[in-house]
């Protein structure tokens, strides 16, 4: 039984995502859509990264629209979107979720009626959207905010529970083909998908906000069963799958069980994960992962200096990092690491030591991030208390009297230049090709075609991304 008969799920375009953000489908919305598969007769999904004219394809009978605001967006843009939805579908119920919606829930639900979000969900769905859909009343749902009687009401938010094994994301609602598609429109021709096998993180890195809920409570690490993950992978057609877990290797025995399950089922794909350097403490499991298809691994090392690792509360030492890599750098995997620069007490010279350290431990690529304070991280108080350190109000980047925002950006570019020597480019390029086996002919053809057509944007190439034979929007 449902209070609604037609649902539309909309994933907005944040406008400033990563270079290859079109690799990643809206898994959260697909999970929410799956939870009401058997009680809402008609369901639609619109991804604004591809559906530029979304107002024209908004289903005419949609009586509930669910928005997912995972990343920061200007509130006026959100208001304009909601206003447009309500103007085209009078009487429609608009709900929203995602970290940005959580943070701005009071503003969203107390806005003028014509641009008001009726209900904001905080935290993961875990079946709460279905409860709302069944009753049509927000008052019966935990962890939501809504406007009633001239004031904002919020129901108590439950702590994060275990990440559920089921339902699986409803991939049948997709219209776009996700892959290595850059924001400028260049499609490198590799179909991709994503999967979440765990949630939360037991560590307390000072710069991180993703391991806490909107009330500051730690999100306990929980993991799906190996069998449920394998079952989902069996349903995925793309050859390259990214695990979006914050910490994919936290439980080595579980990873070993997952690898065994994938080998028994004969599932052959290429996988990318993100984890901590503790992965190097179980080299026998890492070798099994390589046999299973895990090829692209990103680590959050952040720094090579013990005093900076302590400042960031990484619970790591440089010697631990070096010992871990010594045990696994022979494994056929492409190793990438994140480094944060501009930390309190970090000198220009220390930042410029990153390239040599990265090559010495066996990294194939690096990503450099100037320190930012985006929210109420524990690090914010430490930065503001440090003499001569400041937070840029526009970019949220940390800078000091000694090193300005521009200085740190120049250091970032210098680090990348120093790391990517001709020898390193050749070595990493050959390893990437050997392990991930990209179709070079397809990449070259797509690149040449894109350039010959005047480098059309991703919006202009929308029609080429819609699955052949699919209508603009089709019922589930």
Image (spheres, rainbow, N blue to C red):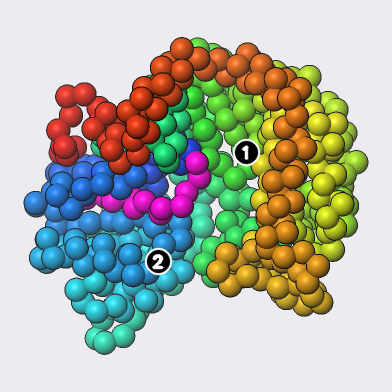
Write the residue at 42% across / 31% down.
186
| Residue closest to the far bottom | 150
Q: Identify the magenta region.
A: 2-19
Q: Chief secondary structure of the magenta span?
A: loop
Q: CA distance from mark 1 to mark 2?
A: 29 Å
In front of the other: 140 or 221: 221
The label on residue 432 is none
Q: Is residue 64 left or right of residue 169?
A: left
* 389 left or right, relative to 262: right
Q: Earlier in the sequence, mark 1 or mark 2?
A: 2
Mark 2 secondary-structure assignment: loop
Q: For residue 74, which numbered disc appears in the image?
A: 2
Q: Does residue 271 appear in the picture of this structure? A: yes
- Looking at the image, which residue is at 83% across and 55% down? 348
Residue 311 position, x and y percent, is: 81, 61
* Quadrant of the image containing the C terminus: top left
């Amino acid at each position: 039984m449902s209070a609604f008969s037609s649902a539309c799920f909309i994933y907005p375009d944040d406008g400033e995502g990563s270079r290859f953000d079109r690799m990643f489908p809206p898994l959260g919305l697909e999970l929410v859509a799956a939870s009401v598969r058997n009680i809402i007769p008609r369901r639609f999904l619109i991804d604004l990264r591809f559906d530029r004219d979304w107002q024209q394809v908004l289903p005419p009978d949609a009586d509930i629209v669910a928005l997912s605001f995972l990343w920061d967006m200007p509130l006026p843009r959100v208001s304009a979107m909601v206003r447009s939805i309500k103007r085209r579908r009078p009487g429609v119920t608009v709900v929203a979720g995602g970290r940005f919606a959580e943070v701005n829930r009071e503003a969203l639900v107390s806005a003028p009626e014509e641009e008001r979000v009726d209900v904001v969900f905080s935290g993961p769905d875990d079946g709460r959207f279905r409860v709302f859909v069944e009753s049509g009343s927000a008052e019966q749902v935990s962890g939501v905010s809504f406007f009633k009687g001239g004031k904002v009401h919020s129901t108590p938010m439950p702590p994060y529970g275990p990440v559920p094994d089921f339902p699986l994301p409803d991939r049948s609602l997709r219209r776009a083909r996700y892959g290595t598609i850059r924001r400028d429109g260049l499609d490198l021709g590799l179909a991709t998908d994503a999967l979440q096998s765990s949630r939360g993180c037991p560590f307390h890195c000072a710069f991180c906000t993703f391991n806490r809920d909107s009330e500051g409570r730690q999100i306990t690490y929980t993991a799906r069963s190996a069998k449920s993950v394998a079952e989902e992978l069996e349903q995925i057609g793309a050859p390259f799958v990214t695990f979006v877990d914050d910490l994919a290797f936290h439980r080595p025995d579980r990873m070993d069980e997952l690898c065994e399950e994938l080998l028994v089922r004969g599932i052959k794909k290429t996988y990318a994960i993100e984890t901590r350097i503790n992965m190097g403490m179980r080299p026998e499991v890492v070798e099994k992962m390589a046999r299973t298809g895990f090829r692209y691994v990103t680590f959050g090392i952040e720094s090579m200096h013990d005093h900076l690792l302590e400042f960031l509360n990484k619970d790591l030492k440089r010697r631990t990092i070096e010992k871990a890599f010594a045990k696994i750098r022979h494994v056929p995997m492409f190793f990438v690491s994140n480094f944060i620069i501009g930390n309190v007490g970090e000198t220009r010279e220390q930042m410029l030591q990153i390239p040599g350290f990265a090559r010495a431990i066996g990294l194939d690529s690096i990503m450099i991030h100037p320190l930012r304070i985006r929210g109420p991280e524990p690090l914010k108080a430490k930065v503001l208390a440090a003499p001569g350190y400041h937070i840029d109000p526009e970019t949220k980047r940390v800078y000091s009297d000694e090193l300005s925002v521009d200085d740190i950006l120049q250091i970032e570019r210098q680090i990348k230049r120093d790391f990517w020597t001709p020898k390193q480019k050749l070595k990493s390029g050959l390893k990437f090709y050997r392990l991930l086996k990209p179709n070079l002919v397809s990449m070259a053809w797509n690149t040449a075609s894109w350039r010959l057509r005047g480098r059309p944007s991703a919006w202009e190439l929308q029609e080429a991304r819609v699955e052949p034979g699919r209508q603009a929007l089709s019922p589930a």
